Amino acid sequence: MDKQLVEQVVTQVLDEMRMRPIPLGISNRHIHLSQQDYDRLFPGMPVTAKKNLLQPGQFAAEQTVTLAGPKGQLHNVRLLGPLRSVSQVEISRTDARTLGITAPLRMSGNLSGTPGVKLISPWAEIDLDSGLIVALRHIHMSPLDALVLRVAHGDTVSVVIEGSGRRTLFDDVAVRVAPDMRLEMHIDTDEANAAGADDPHAVAHLAPRP
């Protein structure tokens, strides 16, 4: 097989890989807790996994809390594990209106200047001073995925989602690359409803670059 033919085959395979659907993860409201905050809310109780998530080592826990704001409450907000160094609460814009709190649009972990919220469990209540955000839509991927898709950590891309007869273009989708990540796009419930992404046949693809 000559070099030109090999290059043609490799190019065809890579083009096909770039066109593969990106798995969609719809992020309902959830919390991440530090060990200290977890121990206060659930004293003497181990974190109990309910369901493993696609990202390796991450899981939805059995434990839930109520979020309380000036205007209302959100019940049964699930803890995602493992525990983190800093507590963080991720909600949608609709949730923020229910609580009566203006939550900024942020990348996970970027919590400087964010508002707090009250967390209520059956055993305790705590007031977080900060940590409430609406998460930026993003794509997790491995370094190999990034190489194939020709993107890098910190890039932003456009993604087309087709579901329930709707075709929605999302711009400014953040790219997050790490060796332990699997290819998956995360959007919140507001975005999923707008795009009809709750349709089991919904698919997402990187939009062609101009």
Image (cartoon, rainbow, N blue to C red):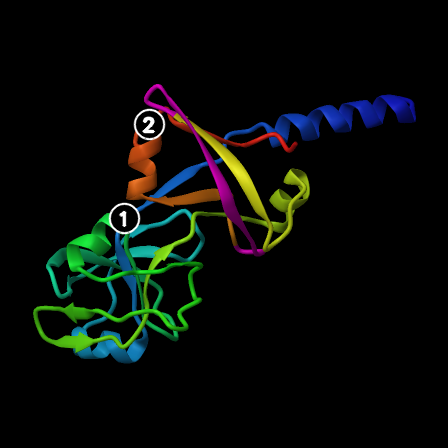
Q: Quadrant of the C terminus?
A: top right
Q: Position of residue 34 (x, y in %)?
A: 32, 74
Magenta segment, which residues? 163-180
Q: Is residue 12 magenta?
A: no
Q: Is residue 179 magenta?
A: yes
Q: Is residue 38 left or right of residue 207?
A: left
Q: Position of residue 172 (x, y in %)?
A: 51, 45
Three-letter amino acid code at the position of disc 1: Asn
Above-or-below relation of 69 to 208: below
Kindly identify which residue carries mark 2: 200
Q: Quadrant of residue 40?
A: bottom left
Q: Residues within 10 Å of mark 1 (few under 14, many from 20)?
A: some
Three-letter amino acid code at the position of disc 2: Pro
Q: Residues within 10 Å of mark 2 (few under 14, many from 20)?
A: few
Label 2 vs 1, first from the N-terminus: 1
What residue is drawn where x is 75% and y is 27%?
11
